[in-house]
């Protein structure tokens, strides 16, 4: 499909398995993806169980306006023969390759083992996917309107964290609880907060409105509105001898 500007419309695949509860838990993540790519063609890849009266992803999101299409794959049962299992997998692989998906959001439930996740990754690579992202916002997290996540990946958000309106969260950010004594305390972000890549906000701290958290900053105390919190500057750990030829592009820092 080609847009008015002559560019091919981006096609994004969202992989989510499970029934009613699993799909509802993924809603904040799905809303964030759609908000980030409003003009992309979003396809939900979800499982179906023939002969079972489950409420599946396609039933929930069919008329929700979040997805443009659906890809369904049949889950084999104990009586399914090996040739049938192989055929089901091959048909799905060919459909995904024809779909031209280059970006995948992997929202599989946490019950999936590391071995299954690696097997999925290899399968989607064969299907033509080149960009893999994983992001999970629990349905118990309180997330405001228009959350922007420009570069997904490595983001950890505690299940009781609060995020205000118009916030921006970059990659590899952690919004986590503190020690065991404060396990039920998670960060509270105000409105229009931007959290730089690699930053960690730990414990029941309150981040005010219009705050900027710099890359790799570790925040363990409250930050007042309108402030900017940055990480310590790099520290030089070795100086080059003046007689030594400069064969490096930059000075070693940490």
Image: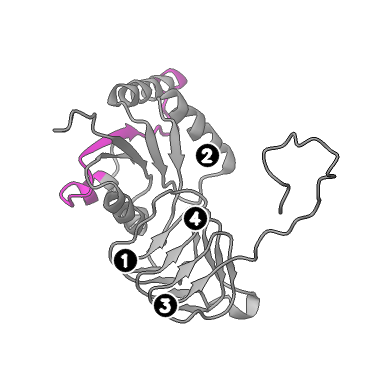
- Asked if residue 10 lies left or right of residue 231, the reply is left
Residue 164 screen position, x and y as percent: 35, 72
Work out how far the residue at label 3 is from the one at label 1, CA to CA, in angstroms.
15 Å
Quadrant containing the C terminus is bottom right
* Residue shown at the point (44%, 46%) measured from the top left: 108
Q: Nearer the viewer, mark 4 or mark 3?
A: 3
- Determine whether 229 is above or below 152 in the image: below
- Which residue has dot 1 on it? 166
Q: Earlier in the sequence, mark 1 or mark 2?
A: 2
Work out how far the residue at label 1 is from the one at label 4, CA to CA, in angstroms.
17 Å
- Which residue has dot 2 on it? 117
Q: Nearer the viewer, mark 1 or mark 4?
A: 1
4, 25: nearer the viewer: 4
Quadrant containing the N terminus is top left
Work out how far the residue at label 4 is from the one at label 3, CA to CA, in angstroms.
24 Å
- Asked if residue 44 lies left or right of residue 160, the reply is left
Q: Are marks 1 and 2 in contact (CB under 8 Å)?
A: no
Work out how far the residue at label 2 is from the one at label 4, CA to CA, in angstroms.
17 Å
- Which residue has dot 3 on it? 226
Q: Secondary structure at mark 2?
A: helix
- Which residue has dot 4 on it? 155
Q: Are marks 3 and 1 in contact (CB under 8 Å)?
A: no
40, 106: nearer the viewer: 40
Q: Earlier in the sequence, mark 4 or mark 3?
A: 4
Q: Are marks 4 and 3 in contact (CB under 8 Å)?
A: no
């Amino acid at each position: 499909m080609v847009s008015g500007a002559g560019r091919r419309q981006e096609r994004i695949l969202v992989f989510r398995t499970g029934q009613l509860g699993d799909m509802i838990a993924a809603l904040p993540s799905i809303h964030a993806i759609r908000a980030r790519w409003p003009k992309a063609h979003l396809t939900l890849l979800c499982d179906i169980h023939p002969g079972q009266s489950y409420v599946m992803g396609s039933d929930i999101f069919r008329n929700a306006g979040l997805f443009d299409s659906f890809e369904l794959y049949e889950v084999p049962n104990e009586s399914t023969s090996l040739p049938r299992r192989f055929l089901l997998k091959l048909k799905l692989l060919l459909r995904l390759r024809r779909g031209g998906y280059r970006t995948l959001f992997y929202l599989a439930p946490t019950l999936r083992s590391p071995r299954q996740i690696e097997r999925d990754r290899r399968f989607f690579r064969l299907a033509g996917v080149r960009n893999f992202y994983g992001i999970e916002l629990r349905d118990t997290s309180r997330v405001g309107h228009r959350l922007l996540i420009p570069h997904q990946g490595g983001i950890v958000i505690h299940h009781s964290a609060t995020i205000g309106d118009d916030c921006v969260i970059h990659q590899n950010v952690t919004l986590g609880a503190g020690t065991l004594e404060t396990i039920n305390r998670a960060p509270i972000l105000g409105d229009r907060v931007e959290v730089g890549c690699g930053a960690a906000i730990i414990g029941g701290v309150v981040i005010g409105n219009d705050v900027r958290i710099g890359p790799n900053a570790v925040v363990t105390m409250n930050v007042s509105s309108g402030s900017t919190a940055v990480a310590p500057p790099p520290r030089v750990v070795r100086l080059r001898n003046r007689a030594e030829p400069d064969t490096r592009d930059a000075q070693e820092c940490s």
